[in-house]
Image (cartoon, rainbow, N blue to C red):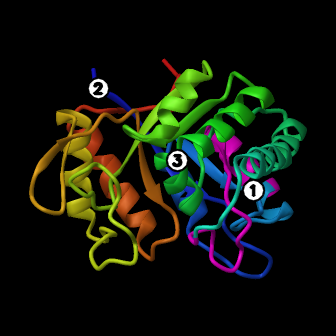
Amino acid sequence: MTRIDLNGDLGESFGAWRMGEDAALLDVVSSANLACGFHAGDFMTMQQTVAAAMERGVAIGAHVSLPDLQGFGRREMRVTPAEVHAMTLYQLGALHGFAHAAGTRLSHVKPHGALYNMAARDRALADAIAAAVCQFDPRLRLFGLSGSALVDAGAAQGLAVAAEAFADRRYRPDGTLQPRSEAGAVIDDAGLATAQALQIALDGTVTAIDGSTIAMRADTLCLHGDGVHAARLARSLRAGLEAAGVTITATGEA
């Protein structure tokens, strides 16, 4: 039986500013990556999203980021491994406080945006994130781009890792994500995203932007929560996976 985790980036509202369709997405995903205040999210949003995920039995993870509210964490910054280590611990501590107070615990950690992409190719930054996660709680699972330095760094620390692929992003021939700044990098069509998810989950491959087929191991598939059609796309994708016999379950669960 094929099993895969379906994760979503949630809790990205801030103050009076609303982002995404969290309630609808929480009815679809098996894991939620919650913003920890650096790229999005605030104390009330974090508390409320933890509660909403618990009500639905969705695994809760920390979506750690560079400190960039204005750029939504999608702008690269010149940061040292020591700074990345400290900012990872800081954000883990913040979300852990809400989870602990609600009677639950974090299950995983996934970097966001620019930090995710930087750690995918820079082993020193990847090691800093993995070390912070391990020191905070070695039971946490580390999510990283399939085939990336972050997955290798997590495994080297002895962490459980989850290789991540994207249903709604295009890939370059080398297995990296096509930059969002390029036209067509984000897949908005539910049918196309579902087809890509099925190819990844069932065949272990993905079609790159040049038409080539590349290997793509995936333990978890990501859907972004900030798209205008995020909830509709998520429902279509889950229905398509289940119709093909794929079981949706959080990583580490039987």
Please report contact status of discs 3 and 2: CB closer than 8 Å, yes or no: no
Q: Is residue 187 left or right of residue 117?
A: left
In reply to whether residue 69 is colored magenta, the answer given is yes
Residue at (78% x, 33% y) in the render: 104
Disc 2 from disc 1: Cα separation: 32 Å
Which of the numbered marks, if any, corresponds to residue 36?
Answer: 1
Q: At which x and y percent is residue 171? A: 27, 57
In reply to whether residue 51 is colored magenta, the answer given is yes
Closer to the chain start, of discs 2 and 1, is: 2
Above or below, 215 against 235 in this view is: above
Residue at (35% x, 58% y) in the render: 177
Residue at (70% x, 32% y) in the render: 131
Q: At which x and y percent is residue 180? A: 40, 72
Q: Is residue 99 left or right of residue 8?
A: right
Q: Is residue 185 left or right of residue 102?
A: left
Residue type at the position of mark 2:
Thr
Magenta-tinted stretch: 47-75
How packed mark 2 is, by other alpha carbons closer than 10 Å (few <14, some 14-19, many 20 or more), is few
How packed mark 1 is, by other alpha carbons closer than 10 Å (few <14, some 14-19, many 20 or more), is many
Closer to the chain start, of discs 3 and 1, is: 1
Q: At which x and y percent is residue 127? A: 62, 36
Disc 3 from disc 1: Cα separation: 23 Å
Which of the numbered marks, if any, corresponds to residue 122?
Answer: 3
Q: Quadrant of residue 22?
A: bottom right
Residue type at the position of mark 1:
Cys
Above or below, 62 against 229 in this view is: above
**As rendered, which of 42 and 116 lies closer to the eye?**
116
